[in-house]
Image: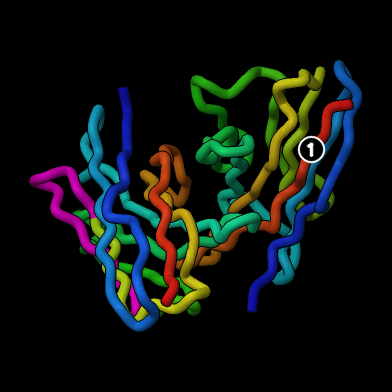
Amino acid sequence: QTVVTQEPSLTVSPGGTVTLTCASSTGAVTSGYYPNWFQQKPGQAPRTLIYSTSNKHSWTPARFSGSLLGGKAALTLSGAQPEDEAEYYCLLYYGGPQVFGGGTKLTVL
Amino acid sequence: EVQLVESGGGVVQPGRSLRLSCTASGFTLGDYAVAWVRQAPGKGLEWVGFIRNKPYGETTEYAASVKGRFTISRDDSKNIAYLQMDSLETEDTAVYYCTGRQNFNIHYWGQGTLVTVSS
């Protein structure tokens, strides 16, 4: 069974920078896994921040960016704001099925 | 404005069936695959399955946890997709989201509908 692993929790100071990662039990994550990143705030539906590794939607704040880093997909937040406190999920494509990571609870404190 | 609205959730007994609908507005659903995602209370997101759009044969893929029990279908003339859930188990209790998926990426999310499987 394929497992996608994220940090369970991270803390960042307001204005600071933090990187969330997404690893695959099958090996290095490449662009062919089409990494997606989603943000979910309490009581709300998720929304897509990043698709195909590094592409942003029109609603994605500029302070978020996606990349590949050390064999993992990565979401970097530069200049954290209080409203960025949320759960973040990644999603990887495996040639048919897709698998979510367990999520990272990001605290801005 | 792009919108996906799920409906059909509710309380159902174990072993029974339920059908969820996902109605799209503001875009042409036929241009997208539709993926269903669920979230059990207090838990993370779980990919349930998806249906490709017509150019890709409207074929489907399912997670192992629901394969053989859940069926995804679509009616692009009505801009609607469906999730038929049979032989429901208490572990299927979750908020179910429909999503618009294109080129292997999920772009749009509905607001979700709660399904509770309980006797």
Quadrant in the picture for the N terminus of chain B: top left
Place of residue B27 in the rendered image (x, y in percent of width and height, measured from the top left) = 25, 31
Place of residue A76 in the rendered image (x, y in percent of width and height, measured from the top left) = 77, 32
Alpha-carbon neighbours of circle 1 within 10 Å: few (<14), some, or many (≥20)? some
Q: Is residue A39 visible?
A: no
Label 1, on which residue? A106
- B106 vs B19: above or below: above
Q: Chain of mark 1?
A: A
Magenta region: which residues? B68-81
- Amino acid type at circle 1 is Leu
Q: Residue at x 33, y 56 (%)?
A: B9
Q: Count numbered badges in the picture.
A: 1
- B18 vs A19: above or below: below
- Disc 1, SS: strand
State which quadrant residue A50 falls in: top right
Q: Is residue A39 left or right of residue B99?
A: right
Q: Is residue B11 left or right of residue A48?
A: left
Is A109 in front, or is A79?
A109
